Amino acid sequence: MAEAGGAVKKTDTEGRIWLGLLAVLALLAVIPGAIGNAFHAHVLVLILLYASMAQSWNILGGYCGQISFGHSVFFGIGAYGAGMAMVRYGSAPWLGVLAGALAASAVSVLISWPCFKLRGHYFAIATFAVVEIFGRLFLVWDWIGGALGLDYPIMDDSWTHFLWSSDKTGYYTGAVALFALVFGVVRSIEGRRLGYYMRAVREGQETAESLGVNSTHVKLTAMALSAFMAALCGAFFAQYNYRVDPPMVVSLDMSMKFVLITILGGMGTFWGPLLGAAVLIPLQEYTRTYLASLGAGVDQVIYGLLIIFMMVRQPRGIMGFLAEFGILGGRSDSAGKEAGDASP
Amino acid sequence: MFSGGATTCARSRRVLRSCILAVIFLLAAGSAFAAEEKVIKIGALFPLTGPAAVSGQNCLAAVQTAADIINGKYDFADFPLASKEGLLDGYRIEIVPGDHQGKPDVAKSEAERLFNQENVFAIIGSYNSSASKPASAVAERLKKIFMCGASSSAELTERGFNYFFRTAATDNIESREFIDYIDYLNKNEGAGIKTLGLLYENSEFGKHAAEEGKSVAAGIGLEVVADVPFTVGATNMSSEVQTLKSANPDAVFGAALGSDYSLMVRTMKQTSWAPKIFINYCTGYQNPSINKELGSDGNFFMGGMGYSPEIAEVYMKAALPAQEIYRAKTGFPLDSDSIQESVCLHVLAQAIEKAGAVDTEKVAALLRSETFPSPLSLSGQVAFSPGGQNNKAFTVITQIVDQKYRTVFPESYADSELTYPFPAWDKR
Amino acid sequence: MAESVCSRPSNGGTILADFSQVLIDGLMNGAIYALVAAGLSLIWGVMDVINFAHGEFLMVAMYACYWLGSLLGIDPLFSWVLTGAFLFFLSAASYLLVVRRCIGRSAMAPLLATFGLSIFLKNFCLNRFTPNFRLLSGTIMEGRVLHVMGASVPLPQLVTALFSLVVLGCLYYFIKRTRIGWAIQATAMDREAAELMGIDTGRIFTLVFGFGGMCVGIAGGFMTSYLAVFPEVGALFSLIAFVVVALGGFGSIPGALLAALLIGLVESFAGFYIAPVIKYVAVFALYVVVILIRPKGLFGW
């Protein structure tokens, strides 16, 4: 698609960095013993997973400007899709994963179609309410196990069941695939008509509509896509942890992770979700393990202070910091995106 | 200018050289030193933060108490390994704590980290049944030992695991005991208890306990007239207590932790209602700090316990010195939940000692086959059935009177008469 | 065995007694939610900021009241003044140090910054005060119960609820009838115009945040007379406060009161006549239903 000269150059650089990164990640998967079972492997897998989660949220929140705190619902539906297939039906998770993702998309469209009438904080609080409703209903829904949750059986490592114990290479490869999928989808949307429409809606819904953009259609498409991706991440989460129960997946805490990582990295940017995850996840994991001796909760105190610091100093997140120092200029339309610039 | 530069340059090179030498020396010394250390690392995975932090921190303190006793030289009567310093020929136990924050996914990754990074020999944990499940699954997959103290869900030992061992009584065992007691009261004291209500937190622990309660109640023809789950951390318990009051069951089984327990007690007092008999699973009832805070409002409630300071005075005297070490750490006496974690370490240590080596297969085989003396266990012994359940787990039913735990059942352990039915709130 | 009889109402009067109990519980709990939410409503109305740390302010107030009660023996009936004042300053400080620097630039930044503040406060208290549940006993109001139409009305909650109405009334009067209140309203309507009129809007914002905190400080002071204090105590109150404010409508104090009472009633009726475990589902479902019919809340403008 033809673009202004300057923009084309940036796309090329970004494209090269993207392919380079994918190559490195893929290489690590094939070199035997590169991943292993160390704690660092776990942190790497989590970074890729949370980056994918954040990027899925970014589709709706960053590019389309609809700040939702409800993504843990879709995450949870995906997780239960995988969990039900493995535990209740005793089969491989893959069909369950697909079913969960499709169900999440369907649910997302159903609940957002009325919610998109709301503006600003009202919409945000409506999404809180949705998470609470789903979370509590799941707790009493016996068909999915209710409060007891679903526990995975002990099985041999395999790709069929996507379960590993002695080595994380399988999980890592799956995480890279998920990461490539979600980021790849966003990359392709960025340059397509849908991407431009989304950004137009974000900048000013009424203006976009006056130019002929069907904002409802655009928002619903963004929502469905975002929910689908979030559900895939949820399925991975279930497979990784050998268990699903409602408070693990459908909770405000989990929803906040989707939001925080994206905003701390840089909302509405391609790299923001990855940067946010690359900083927050190691911080979260390493402070918990190494600061435990300082007393309970010290890691969380640091986490809280970091969030405050970032929001006070640079609400555009890490991408904002980088822009300040002239690195990774980013695309001209996304460089100026701040948390909450979205039209209320 | 040049000479100044050269001198500075030479000096900094010298400094750099001495630093490098110092580091090499330290590393060499360090590794030489490390080679001498005989340490058995044991992981302790508990909720040190989050909603269950009170219990989690107590459990960790209990494990550390046990480690202190094993590592040190104490002249305790009838206490295996206390008088010997450490294990085998000079090994000492080092506890490596892990915090799962009450989240099953964190429990899973912490278990992996403890085994793979910290190279712990075994893990003791994890209090919340929902966290113990994935953490012990990690251990089983890695063929490593997981000792579980206070997680009550019976499912944990119904998985056919080979490396999982749980010392506490399950909610199934406790339910049977409660029902046996009600049956006893009906037959011997004409108590006339015909209906049952259940009030439990809507979590893995509460839900499972309630299911067990319901299934054994049918066995003596007790009719379940109220089944009331509640949200953890609720802002009020008005609807819950009112629902119970209007169904008015003769007996209620309760499963509420911490603050919910105190809210429940106070709400019952405000509505001037109580069943004839209220028995609790391992919950806020067994927590000494809660009972201190509740004061006289906590009187006449009942629960199943594997330990109380009052029971120890009479039946578990060997545990009293250990309790003092624990009290120095937390300011409270041992409680029924945290003591199980101590038991786990003591039993594991004895198995290692008996195996003569820090070898998982040998130790696990002994755990599966031997009976171990356990001064911190009410029955005095611990032995595991296939699947990992301690078949010598034993609890008594106690009632709080004058803010003290009085044992009322079984008869051989009873030190008081039961106050039945629950006295009216305004007549106390 | 001791022979005592628990008080049991006769079958005929039970239905009416149950109904009046549910009604009174709902109104009381609703009034208490209103007191917790009042401060949030004020802050949102004037500054368009959702204070995510609101529940943690409540928790801090409850700890303050607990320590005043257990260490100095001051009853919550009197210590609420002190906790209110303490929270005024804490809240104003939060504004000056944190919120002021993110406001205006983005809509999400203050919300996330206060989210960070909530995590900080909660874990700071966990670290310093241990997670043990603290229950204040021996207070003046404790354990006293009134009986009205067959329903039991506990005195601590009743006093808290009535006081909440008083506080809300005072707050409303303050906003509508005093000069500072007019300045606040002016700032809320149009910040630039207010500046042009000579109002120091920065100071107004500090004051508003302070008053918002003071309201929740008073709430915390009273609530310690019947609730246990622990680091997570504010969580659910926080969520309900958000829903109350959004349901009542942006910036409306009467709206917040009405919404809170409605929520208290829905919670109470759903909790008893349907099932206690879904009482909060009903509350959040109510919000979703109302907001779809009236997207700006009941009284929003």
Image (cartoon, helix red, strand yellow):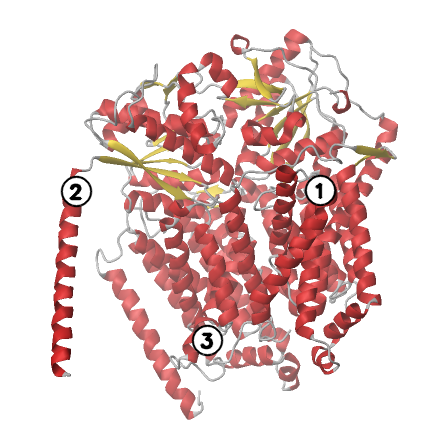
Which sits in the foreground, C84 or B282?
A: C84
Secondary structure of the residue carrying tag 3 is helix
Farthest-out residue, bottom: A5
Query: Is there one chain holding both mark 1 and mark 2?
Result: no
| Residue density around tag 1, few if under 14, some if 14–19, many if 20 or more, within 10 Å | many
User: With respect to residue B177, does A73 lie above or below?
Assistant: below
Secondary structure of the residue carrying tag 2 is helix
Residue marked by disc 3:
A320
- The quarter in which the N terminus of chain C is drawn is top right
Whole-angstrom CA distance, mark 1 to mark 2, is: 58 Å
Residue marked by disc 1:
C76
Q: Chain of mark 3?
A: A
Residue B164 position in % (x across, y down): 36, 32
**Residue B19 in sight:** yes
Whole-angstrom CA distance, mark 1 to mark 3, is: 48 Å
Classify residue C182 by image quadrant.
Answer: bottom right
- Residue appearing at x 31%, y 21% in the figure: B74
